[in-house]
Image (cartoon, grey):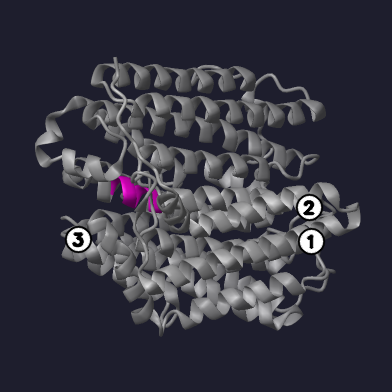
Amino acid sequence: MIAAAQVTYTAAQAWSDLAQIGPIVAVTVALLVAVVVDLLLPRGLRGPVVTVIAIVGLVSALAIAAYRLVNGYGGPAYFRFVSGDAFALFFEMLFALIGVLAVIVSSSYVRRRGLYEAELQVLTLAAIVGMMSLAAAGSLVTVFLGLELLSIALYVSCGYNRIELPSQESAAKYLIIGGFASAFVLYGMALIYGATGTTVLSDIATRVTSDSAGNPLLLLGVLLMGVGFAFKVSAAPFHMWTPDVYQGAPLPVTAFMSVATKAAAFAMILRVFNYGLGHLGPEWQVLLAFTAAASMVVGNLMAIVQASLKRMLAYSGVAHAGYILVGVLAGGRAGVAAVLFYLFGYVFMNFGAFAVVSTLSGPAGDGDLYEDLNGLAYRNPTLGVLMSVFMLSLAGFPPMVGFFGKVFLFTAGISAGWTWLVVLAVLTSVVSVYYYFRVLFHVWSPLPEAPVRFAFGPVRGPVTVVLLAGVFAVALGPLSGFLLQVGLNGAAPLLSGR
Amino acid sequence: MLIRRNPLVMLICIELMLNAVNLTLVAFSRQLNNREGQLFALMTMTVAAAEAVVGLAILVDIFRVRDLEDVDDLSELKG
């Protein structure tokens, strides 16, 4: 018979718990309001109104998270199943920012492609709720729920262009492989629960010591979770789904999931591995080091031969997952802060690049070939210059944010003793310059004589987003000291008690 | 799941994997005399249901446009 523990839960406690998940509550409320409004309004008004509601919800989540971060209000909530600490707040702000950018880009994209607008925004909000829960997770149960909430919302988003075969195929592939990966993660969690007798991460952190390394349940659990997590961050050799899914999904969805899912999955890895299973470092580090090395090599080499920009960016994403894993492996204050810094910068440069490509789509389809970029710098100088900024930043040229991100990651890697991995990372990022510069070559090539496949439609929204992302990508370079401080602040909750 | 090629059967296999997890969780919960495992199993069941719904919806959407008996037919995207 299982004994019932006496639990008291007062109203004051309920309010304080609710405040700890304030940003998540804000987005959830916006999501629910948007669903109801979508049912009540006449057809023509639905899309714009839902978009405005989504933006309001995300901006208020951003404000709440910033307010709580500045005032240092973070702490555990709901019997430590959730934590509103600085780490969670950092990611909540990041997801709210990406959300605003994604909602603006989608709104313009769906109109040009003749798709429904409201549902896509609602799905984006649902995915953001999942990502925020993942970042704020204090227990394996919460980690799993957040992971599934974000994945299921994204499966549907990928198949959003229902009548087109590529979009359907992308959704089906993502669903089957994502479900497979989730089952792996879940079985790993079940085994870790069996080995430690708890799902709460802070309890796991105290119960799993370096003596536990001989426990087969625990090791198998770590292995299964590691495989599942590698699927989710699209790290090689579990990256096969990435290019197909990215290519088939509607462009704003690809842009959103390429950055947001990656950030959320790394938040999950940091929480579970660096915090919960920190004492088993030597065991999971072997696994991740292999994955990191494979990702950097496979991602960078495969990106060279792609003809489609979406596929190239997908493989470049695989390579970047490898770089970020170096920071995860380094761990400690410097490593975790470098990961947070890199994710923040990566979000803007990669999303910006996808947003530029999304402006090339019209009713006929997406213009995602290199040739579609020809003469972009003369057709639309703003987009041309900013696309160059994003590519230089992804390639890691100073003074862009990508350069500082790599510097922080690699110095953290070297000081933690991962010299061979850092050497490999530097060598492979030299290779990456080739395919990023190929984009620049097309952008700055003279205007083609034949009419371009995709003329510009009404793209004011995306241009604003591209401008914003560009400003972030450039300005965060000189401001890197400040952002690194924010990252260090966010890393602190994972390292307390070490 | 790895040897099956029919997408519907693959979906069923994912459900089977999730059910295996549920059994594991409940067994551990009983063995450890701890209720968190049962809570976890309930959550898993809910999520599995949601995933099945979305999965079937996506597959129905594909079947409407074309006949799909084998996942290898999904080869629009390759590079």
Q: Is residue B73 visible?
A: yes
Indicate the amino acid at tag 3. Thr
Q: Residue at x 57, y 18 (%)?
A: B12
Q: Residue at x 21, y 44 (%)?
A: A205
Indicate the amino acid at tag 1. Val
Magenta-tinted stretch:
A267-273
Say the numbered circle drawn on residue A49. Answer: 1
In primary-sequence order, the first of circles 3 and 1 is: 1
User: The residue tagged with tag 3: helix, strand or loop?
Assistant: helix
In primary-sequence order, the first of circles 1 and 2 is: 2
Say the numbered circle drawn on residue A204. Answer: none
Compared with residue A122, is residue A456 higher up or lower down, i.e. above or below?
below
Q: Chain of mark 1?
A: A
Give percent across and percent down for residue A120. 71, 50
How would you rate the neighbour count of disc 1 (Cα within 10 Å): few for under 14, some for 14-19, many for 20 or more? some
Going by the image, does A134 lie left or right of A329?
right
Q: CA distance from mark 3 to mark 2?
A: 55 Å
Would you say the magenta stretch is mainly helix, strand or loop?
A: helix
Per the image, the residue denoted by label 3 is A419
